[in-house]
Amino acid sequence: MRKDGFNRRTILTATTALGAAGLVPRGALAQAAAPASRPAASLPARGEFVVRGAHVLSMDDKVGDLPSGDVHVRDGAIVAVAASVSAPGAQVIAGKGMICMPGFVDTHWHLWTSFLRPVMRADDPKRTYFPVSFALGLHYTPEDSYSAVRLGLAEALSAGVTTTHNWAHNVRSPAHADAEVKAMRDTGIRGRFAYGPALGMPNDKPMDIADWARLKRDVGKDPLISLGICSRNIDGNNTSRGAINADMAKKEWGAARELGLPITLHTNGSASIQLLNEANLLGPDVQLVHPLNTDAKDWEALAKHGVHYSTSPLGEAGRSGEMQFPELLQSGVLVSMSIDNVTAERCDCFACMRMMQTINRHRTGGKIKITTKRLVEIATIDGAKDLGLADKTGSLTPGKRADLILVRTAAPNMSMIGDPYDALVQLAQPSDVDTVVVDGRILRSKGQFTALDYENVVHEAGEAVAGLQTRAKWPV
């Protein structure tokens, strides 16, 4: 856990509010302004278009890269990627001066905290991420969850993220779960909703397993949304987010596996990996988060069982211990990249790749080679593999769904580029993202949303967090 002043005393202070919140019937929390009554958002239609003359980075070895190439999309699918494509009647998107590549795949993001930025203070230990999200998280309504997730996803799309892993570790009721899924649907993003516990729930109480099954039936009909679970910690760390024992993990993970749901878990060092290994819980359906303070025995066990690891470079760089993604990669463990949260950070996959490059150079002195192309793969196709979506997204492969972005190379920070992978890792920033396409829908064009009313998104999020502060009587 990061050293930001969130200690036992902070937990006990915030738990005063928990005592009151725990007296509120579960259904009462779900009654306030449930987003289910909102009409579905109007998303752009899937048509037919061709990106022409872009520098195409396909992330597919068979397709390769094209210094000047075309990408043909029809009805949400990639039809062809070639130096020149014939597509009479298709809309033409000028790609000259652009890099065309798969959209970024985020593999771990607490979207429910996204509207808490106004409440945070970097230099006040009582108002950093953990104490604020814990104290206010106890008072979330479904409408709060919807507004926060939608705000975070708007930032995701603007930064070129086309797939996200919504790591929802504050699901206070079925209505809260529905609200977060609806926010994902209303923005048009692809992703997995990881159904978690309610913040502050007793560690000896299982999560709402019955509702996992209910929601699986719902999202099973959705081609863009899949379902998983996020587990509480099992090594005693970060007790604010739950700290269960191996027996409870076996119960919850067993239920998840019966439903065919993948599992994700925060870690902090070797303890949790050792416990999971001893309990025979590791497997290819498990994603661990934050590769810090592990050792060679852990890497061997993870590789043996096909476990994946998600690293959040911007946040982890400020934590104690070493970011060990280079050793994991060297050991054959699938590593993906994630945003974590956008309260104290921003959604910037370019900066995440650059941080990974810097950390590797600093820690290994180049002994473990990770090229800029490899970093872009980690941010795209490897993320898709981690989430079990590589058959749909992560590369510009004919037959896959059209999740792609265009990155401008004309801005001062990108002009006169040489190698495009070097440019993406070392020079690019979110403002260079020109066009964002998810499942064939053009959600952003020329740096602007095509359908999402961003001013309304921000306005609703501002009203929601103000109301949340009033209900929580924050700051105390």
Image (spheres, grey):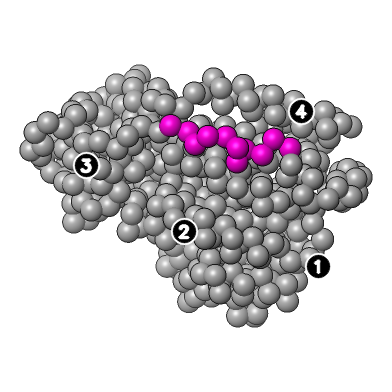
Tell me if residue 68 comes above or below residue 239 in the rendering. above
Ranked by sequence position, the earlier of labels 1 and 3 is 3
Label drawn at residue 220: 2
Whether residue 143 is situated above or below residue 446 in the rendered picture:
below
Residue type for callout 3: Arg
Residue 209 shows in this picture: yes
Q: Residue at x 74, y 37 (%)?
A: 32
Sequence-wise first label, 1 or 4: 1
Q: Amino acid at mark 4?
A: Gly
Q: Earlier in the sequence, mark 4 or mark 3?
A: 3
Q: Are marks 1 and 4 in contact (CB under 8 Å)?
A: no
Q: Which mark is residue 467?
A: 4
Which of discs 2 and 4 lies nearer the camera? The answer is 2
Place residue 81 in its image quadrant.
top left
Label 3, on which residue? 74
Judged from the image, the secondary structure of the residue bearing numbered disc 4 is helix
Q: CA distance from mark 1 to mark 3?
A: 51 Å
Q: Position of residue 296 (x, y in %)?
A: 55, 71
> Residue 192 versus residue 356: which sits nearer the camera?
192
Callouts 2 and 3 close, C-beta under 8 Å: no
Give the left or right position of residue 191, taking residue 463 as reference: left
Alpha-carbon span between mark 4 and mark 3: 44 Å
Residue 279 appears left or right of 61: right
Residue count near mark 4 (Cα–Cα under 10 Å), binned few <14, some 14–19, many ≥20: some
Sequence-wise, the earlier of marks 2 and 1 is 1
Q: Which residues are magenta?
A: 32-42
Q: Which mark is residue 204?
A: 1
Query: Looking at the image, is mark 1 or mark 3 nearer the viewer?
Result: 3
Structural distance between the alpha carbons of marks 2 and 3: 24 Å
